[in-house]
Image: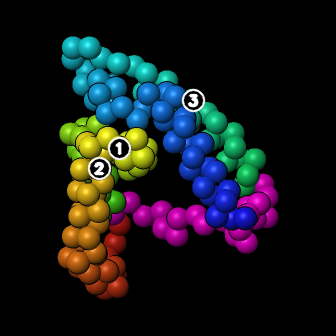
Amino acid sequence: MKAFFGLFAGTLFGAGLVVSGMAEPERVLAFLTLSGDWEPALAFVMGSALIVTAICYRLTMRREHPLFDASFHLPASTVIDIRLVLGSAIFGVGWGVAGYCPGPAIVGAMLMDLRALVFIGAFLGGLLLFELTLNRAGTSAVQSGSRGV
């Protein structure tokens, strides 16, 4: 049942991306480019999502546990460290260059968009590179008492 509702939520999210046009990298890039033909649609999509999330988060967190799981899975750390800042910056640069982030790229791949498939390949390659190199270095830094910003 848990897997079914996860699939349902992901499908609903993907449908929302398609309906809003946010699965099209050109629209995202038009928002991120402030000169020329600036497209404000992404701001409205993000603003709407923020309002819905804020309301639903408050309602959901009043519960003892989620409907389809034994406990909530919240971030274990609230520390803002160099790994978080660098990861966020890399994400932003990748989003600005490709016009994709992981959610819309998965939707694009389901629509057989070659650009999305290339993005997902590069994304998976970056994850693998992180796991093979940087994650090991970061784990040892955390274990030795690295402090956040």
Label 2 sits on residue: 117
Residue 77 placement, left or right of 98: right
Residue type at numbered disc 3: Ser
At label 1, counting other C-alpha atoms closer than 10 Å, the crowd grade (few under 14, some 14-19, many 20 or more) is few
Q: Earlier in the sequence, mark 3 or mark 2?
A: 3
Q: Mark 1 and 2 residues: CB-CB less than 8 Å, in contact?
A: yes
Q: Earlier in the sequence, mark 1 or mark 3?
A: 3
Q: CA distance from mark 3 to mark 2?
A: 28 Å
Q: Is residue 47 above or below residue 107?
A: above
Q: Earlier in the sequence, mark 1 or mark 2?
A: 1
Residue type at numbered disc 2: Leu
Span of residues in magenta: 62-82
Residue type at numbered disc 1: Met
In the rendered structure, find residue 112 and report the number of the disc placed on it: 1
Which SS type dominates the magenta stretch?
loop
Q: Residue at x 30, y 54 (%)?
A: 120
SS for callout 1: loop
Q: Is residue 47 visible?
A: no
Q: CA distance from mark 1 to mark 3?
A: 28 Å
Residue ranking furthest to the top: 36
Say which quadrant the C terminus sits in: bottom left
Q: Mark 1 and 3 residues: CB-CB less than 8 Å, in contact?
A: no
Q: Is residue 13 above or below residue 136?
A: above
Label 3 sits on residue: 48
SS for callout 3: helix
